[in-house]
């Protein structure tokens, strides 16, 4: 056997790919492996037809794979001819867009429902270009399968957790909450909101405590009551069913961006977009908008009562219409307002629905807006300033939804099933009991005169490594923690805001000057620190140690060049 024959035998057989799209069948008899895997990954988006596959294709393609789907070697063909091409061929892949199935032949390596593949291998054997695959839970996957499976029907009926946003966000939600609010008022249960009496158990104003309980009641009743316009389902059921899938796709798109790919939003003009399953962040925003609407409803009712209206007349139709109109304005205004000082809530919802991560000021292809900066420009914290300057890469933002669990109500939980929520409640309870027990034991030891070191009390007492922190090859992050503590001490001692701002700006100049030619920036920073120590002697020990660490960092920088330093930190 000559060398060329050996090379030919080492190459894999051409892959046959069949795509079933309703009455249309597409056949590729010699599809490149990377292109076939990219096609497989695109099924993560739940495309309804071949055109939608083409629309999702840019979110998954890597260099070396054709830019557009029509660049693949596919042709329309008869369904029987396509199935005959697969039969008896080991390396084949069949995708059924109608029955939501991926079927792979015995000649293909198993991939699984959730995987991240590396498409490109460089000359050194390193793998690059991540290709995330996260099939929706309603898709079937058959690997190492017989060609006969392609000819059969899927095992179970396709059940997609559709979301009726017209009911959830529209007039049905506003009318439903308005009716429940007015019913509470008509029953005489609305407390006087200006009552300053303190609740003995909670330590908060009694009116606030009672009002929160009423808010929980109204919110829970809205979510947990079945409706005819939802075919007997309750609104809560529409909030769940696809959080893990949606979150996995968003994480995959973030990974692709962090390794050089563009940020591309899923299209919003495809079949099923309006009632597509709800992601986790959209659900969290929905919780908050409901709470905002309900809270505003209480104050509206309070003003009505102050005008002399009788509480028992609050269920009449005119007041219902006026309150509903008011609450609709509250809903619309809140959704367009910055959420916790960041991007508008409506933008967060759109990113969740279009399955794209929110990176600070990162342009998103297909969307007009982008995530607002994470840190305010007038923040005087050196740690925040480092993050704002993107020294550690783009800052990504997400909502964890912890506040949905604070009421200890299954109705609001991020868990879909009661059993999972109950299990977590039991774990929280056990953790709380353990924490309280250990805290009581610690306090008893301290009362008995025992001393113990609190490693979290100070950046100087924490067990920081002698070297640089991970991801911080120049040593600035460790310095920023210590400078932040010095500045916090100065603020407690009465230092004015300008002095703190100047310290932060001086440290920024020192960082941005790099390892060389920063003598002037260093001298200015040390001068400001000395001035602070002269005025507030209590910070002198920390200032002196910080100054010595500046000198140590400079000596280390002179003894190595930047490339060696990076290789030490990132040997891979």
Image (cartoon, grey):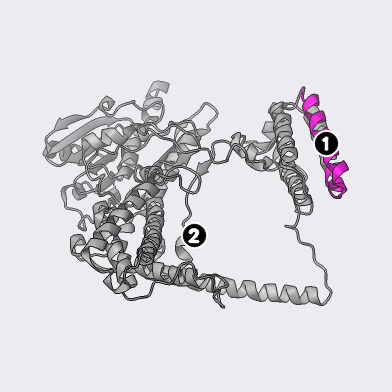
Residue linked to disc 2: 402
Characterize the local packing of mark 1: few (<14), some (14-19) or many (20 or more) Cα atoms within 10 angstroms.
few
Rendered-image quadrant of the C terminus: top right
**Vertical placement of residue 443 versus 263, above or below:** below
Q: Main secondary structure of the magenta part?
A: helix
Badge 1 element: helix
Instruction: Note whether residue 60 is visible.
Output: no
Disc nearer the start of the sequence (1/2) = 2
Q: What range of the chain is rendered magenta?
A: 517-543
Badge 2 element: helix
Residue 461: x and y in percent read 79, 54
**Vertical placement of residue 484 versus 409, above or below:** above
Name which residue lies at 11% across and 35% down: 78
In-front residue for pair 248/493:
493
Q: CA distance from mark 1 to mark 2?
A: 42 Å
Name which residue lies at 37% across and 30% down: 11
Residue 540 in magenta? yes
Question: Which residue is farthest front?
Answer: 308
Residue 238: x and y in percent read 29, 58
Residue linked to disc 1: 552
In-front residue for pair 165/341:
341
Residue 492: x and y in percent read 75, 52
Q: Is residue 531 left or right of residue 146?
A: right
């Amino acid at each position: 056997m000559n060398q060329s024959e050996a090379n030919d035998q080492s190459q894999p057989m051409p892959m046959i790919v069949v795509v079933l799209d309703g009455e249309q069948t597409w056949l590729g008899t010699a599809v490149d492996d990377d292109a076939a895997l990219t096609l497989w990954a695109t099924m993560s988006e739940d495309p309804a037809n071949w055109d939608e596959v083409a629309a999702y294709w840019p979110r998954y393609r890597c260099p070396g794979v054709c830019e557009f789907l029509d660049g693949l070697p596919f042709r329309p063909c008869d369904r029987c001819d396509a199935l005959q091409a697969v039969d008896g061929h080991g390396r084949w892949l069949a995708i059924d867009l109608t029955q939501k199935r991926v079927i792979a032949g015995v000649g293909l390596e198993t991939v699984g429902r959730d995987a991240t593949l590396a498409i490109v291998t460089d000359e050194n054997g390193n793998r690059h270009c991540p290709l995330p695959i996260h099939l929706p839970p309603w898709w079937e996957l058959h690997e190492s399968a017989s060609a006969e499976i392609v000819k059969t029907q899927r095992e179970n009926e396709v059940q997609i957790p559709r979301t009726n946003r017209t009911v959830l966000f529209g007039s049905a939600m506003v009318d439903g909450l308005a009716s429940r609010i007015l019913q509470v008022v008509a029953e005489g249960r609305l407390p006087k909101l200006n009552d300053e009496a303190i609740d003995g158990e909670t330590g908060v104003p009694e009116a606030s405590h009672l009002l929160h309980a009423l808010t929980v009641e109204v919110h829970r009743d809205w979510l947990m009551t079945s409706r005819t316009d939802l075919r007997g389902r309750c609104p809560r059921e529409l909030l769940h069913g696809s959080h893990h899938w949606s979150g996995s796709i968003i994480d995959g798109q973030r990974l692709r961006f962090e390794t050089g790919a563009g940020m591309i939003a899923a299209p919003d003009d495809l079949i099923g977009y309006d009632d597509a399953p709800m992601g986790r962040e959209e659900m969290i925003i929905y919780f908050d908008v409901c709470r905002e609407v309900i809270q505003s409803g209480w104050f509206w009712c309070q003003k009505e009562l102050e005008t002399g209206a009788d509480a028992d007349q609050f269920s009449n139709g005119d007041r219902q219409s006026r309150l509903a109109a008011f609450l609709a304005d509250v809903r619309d205004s809140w959704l367009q307002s910055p959420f916790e000082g960041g991007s508008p809530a409506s933008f967060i919802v759109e990113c969740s629905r279009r399955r794209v991560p929110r990176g600070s000021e990162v342009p998103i292809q297909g969307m007009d807006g982008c995530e607002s900066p994470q840190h305010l420009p007038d923040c005087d914290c050196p740690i925040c300033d480092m993050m704002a300057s993107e020294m550690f890469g783009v800052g990504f933002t997400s909502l964890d939804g912890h506040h949905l669990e604070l009421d200890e109500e299954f109705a609001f939980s991020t868990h879909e099933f009661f059993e999972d929520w109950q299990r977590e409640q039991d774990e929280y309870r056990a953790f709380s009991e353990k924490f309280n027990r250990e805290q009581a034991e610690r306090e008893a030891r301290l009362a008995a005169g025992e001393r113990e070191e609190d490693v979290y009390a100070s950046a100087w007492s924490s067990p920081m490594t002698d070297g640089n922190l991970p991801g911080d090859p120049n040593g600035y992050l460790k310095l920023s923690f210590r400078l932040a503590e010095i500045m916090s001490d100065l603020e407690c001692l009465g230092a004015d805001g300008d002095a703190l701002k100047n310290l932060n700006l001086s440290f920024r100049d020192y960082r941005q000057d790099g390892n060389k030619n920063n003598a002037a920036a260093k001298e200015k920073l040390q001068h400001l620190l000395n001035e602070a120590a002269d005025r507030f002697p209590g910070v002198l020990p920390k200032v002196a140690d910080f100054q010595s660490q500046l000198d140590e960092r400079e000596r280390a920088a002179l003894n190595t060049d930047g490339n060696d330093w990076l290789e030490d930190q990132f040997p891979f």
